[in-house]
Amino acid sequence: MQILEKSDKESEEYIIQNKIKTRFGATFVVIIIVILITAVAMTGVYFDYW
């Protein structure tokens, strides 16, 4: 990333922007991770590992 002056606000670059696609993507990833963790836990209970 470039070092920018504070007066140059038009060319500021952000790694994560507060956009609809970013929020949807982050929510989607979190939901998938929760589903995977739940599936692993249910498999452990089913096969009597816990």
Image: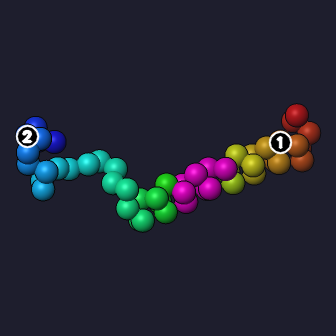
Kindly identify the amino acid type of the residue bearing the numbered disc 2. Answer: Glu
Residue under circle 1? Answer: 44
Residue for point 91% across, 39% down: 48
Q: Would residue 49 be visible to someone looking at this image?
A: yes
Side of 48 relative to 42 (left or right): right
* Residue 44 found in image quarter: top right
Side of 20 relative to 6 (left or right): right
Say which label, 2 or 1, has the lower sequence index: 2
Total tally of numbered discs in the picture: 2
Looking at the image, the residue that sits furthest to the bottom is 20
* 31 in the magenta segment: yes
Magenta-highlighted residues: 27-34
Magenta segment's dominant SS is: helix
* Residue 49 found in image quarter: top right
Looking at the image, the residue that sits furthest to the top is 50
Residue for point 33% across, 54% down: 17
Residue for point 61% across, 56% down: 32
Query: From what the image shows, is residue 47 above or below residue 18?
Result: above
Residue for point 20% across, 50% down: 13
SS of the residue at dot 2?
loop
Residue under circle 2? Answer: 5
Mark-to-mark CA distance, 2 and 1: 54 Å
Q: Residues within 10 Å of mark 1 (few under 14, many from 20)?
A: few
Label 2–label 1 contact, CB within 8 A: no
Give the quadrant of the N terminus: top left
Give the quadrant of the C terminus: top right
Query: From what the image shows, is residue 21 above or below residue 1?
Result: below
* 22 in the magenta segment: no
Q: Residue 2: which numbered mark, if any?
A: none
Residue 24 in picture, x, y percent from top left = 49, 63
Relative depth, front residue between 36 and 1: 1
Kindly identify the amino acid type of the residue bearing the numbered disc 1. Answer: Gly
